[in-house]
Amino acid sequence: HQETLSLRASPDEVRRFVTTPERIMDYYPNGTGCGVIEPGESFYCQGKAGVSLMERLADESDDTKVVLKVTTARGLRPPFSAEQIRQNAFFIMIEDWEIYPDGEGGTRLVKSWRDIEKLKLRWLPLAFIVRQSAKAESSHLKTHWDLQAGR
């Protein structure tokens, strides 16, 4: 699935927002908490349905794209570690965040969700759920990130 958003935030701000757990919590479904695991490289976001580890894939990321590997687990309690989430994962996917200058200091963000891998709960229609969540999340992301622009 892919969504394209026009944001007020500059490309530098958007690159920073992508790896800032509080900015991901701006749209994370039913978010209840977040934290940094390795600054600039990995963090987690927790919601009612589980906890997701977001890891920046340095070899696939550059000035115009940030690529995150998202590993989601259920039934875990804090404190969270990357290894704990990986060992209990029920699905993994990749998010591509393509970042382009747009207009007077804004950004055109093209966000893609791909390579969904179900490790547990194989009966769950995960591709459908991800697609529906992505559509709902995009409006929240735009609203909140536009408010954070320039701060």
Image: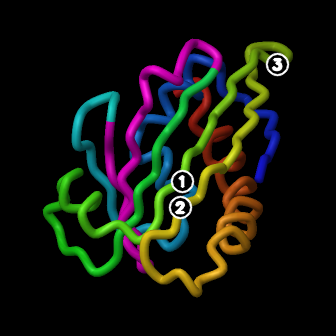
Image-based side of 18 in relation to 83, left or right: right
Q: Give the residue type at disc 3.
A: Asp
Q: Residues within 10 Å of mark 3 (few under 14, many from 20)?
A: some
Q: Nearer the viewer, residue 104 or 85?
A: 85
Q: Of the residues under marks 3 and 1, which one precedes in the sequence? A: 1
Q: How far across and how far down the image is residue 120, in percent? A: 43, 77
Does the residue at mark 1 contact the one at mark 2 (Cβ under 8 Å)?
yes
Could you tell me which residue is drawn at 35 percent across and 69 percent down?
73
Spatial CA distance of label 3 from label 1 is 28 Å
Q: Which residue in the protein does label 1 denote?
A: 93
Q: Nearer the viewer, residue 141 or 115?
A: 115
Q: Give the residue type at disc 1.
A: Met
Q: How far across and how far down the image is residue 20, in percent? A: 41, 38
Image-based side of 99 in relation to 74, left or right: right
Q: Residues within 10 Å of mark 1 (few under 14, many from 20)?
A: some
Spatial CA distance of label 1 from label 2 is 6 Å
Identify the mark at residue 139; answer none if there is no mark: none
Q: Which residue in the protein does label 2 denote?
A: 117
Check the image and report above or below for 40 versus 81. above
Residue range corresponding to the magenta coloring: 42-64
Could you tell me which residue is drawn at 70 percent across and 41 percent down?
111
Q: Give the residue type at disc 2.
A: Glu
Q: Is disc 1 placed on a helix, strand or loop?
A: strand
Q: Is disc 2 placed on a helix, strand or loop?
A: strand
